[in-house]
Amino acid sequence: EKEEKEKKEEKKEVRPVMSIGESWRAQMCWGKVDLIGHEKCMRWLIATCAKRSTGHGTCQELRALVRGECMGLGEDGENSKYKAEACKYADDMGMEEMPPLGGPRAAGGAAAGGAAAASASMPAEL
């Protein structure tokens, strides 16, 4: 068991932290009301989070948001106008399978869309 844990820790990719400007831009994009519908921010976040980390969990939260919207866990559930876009972004981010997470959406803002449940099956930060 201890050996497996050590192997998992070795496999974790440590990415450099974003510059101050990139981190600021990530936060500005994260604050968008309909982030999934904001193509420019989404494309930038996906590309940047693939190479660098914010150091604050924004990239991990982005993965949880995309996963939740794609699985129909967003505010509008299966009727989300952003479901198709979210699933496309999930594919772009390398999220191959979308198994049901179960349970209602967590209370809170747009970022809460299944974030607690989704983070259990995702890497620490994209």
Image: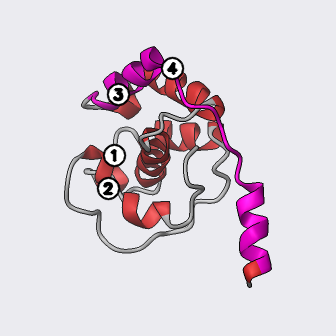
Q: Which mark is residue 6?
A: none
Dot 1 or dot 4: first in sequence order is: 4
Separation of marks 2 and 4 at Cα, in angstroms: 35 Å
Dot 3 or dot 2: first in sequence order is: 3
Q: Is residue 34 magenta?
A: no
Residue bearing the label numbered 4: 19
Tell whether label 3 touches label 4 (CB within 8 Å). Answer: no
Q: Which residues are magenta?
A: 3-32
Residue bearing the label numbered 1: 80
Separation of marks 2 and 1 at Cα, in angstroms: 6 Å
Indicate the amino acid at tag 4.
Ser
Q: Which mark is residue 27?
A: 3
Indicate the amino acid at tag 3.
Gln
Relative to 22, 16 lies left or right: right
- Nearest to viewer (mark 2 / mark 4): 4
- Name the quadrant containing residue 9: bottom right
Disc 1 crowd rating (10 Å Cα; few below 14, some 14-19, many 20+) is some
Separation of marks 3 and 2 at Cα, in angstroms: 25 Å
Disc 3 crowd rating (10 Å Cα; few below 14, some 14-19, many 20+) is some
- Nearest to viewer (mark 3 / mark 1): 3
Dot 4 or dot 3: first in sequence order is: 4
Q: Which mark is residue 77?
A: 2
Name the one closer to the observer, 61 or 79: 61
| Residue 86: x %, y % from top left | 48, 41
Indicate the amino acid at tag 1.
Ser
Residue at (20, 60) in percent of width and height: 107
Identify whether 45 is placed above or below 80: above
Q: Quadrant of the C terminus?
A: top right
Tell whether label 1 touches label 3 (CB within 8 Å). Answer: no
Separation of marks 3 and 1 at Cα, in angstroms: 24 Å
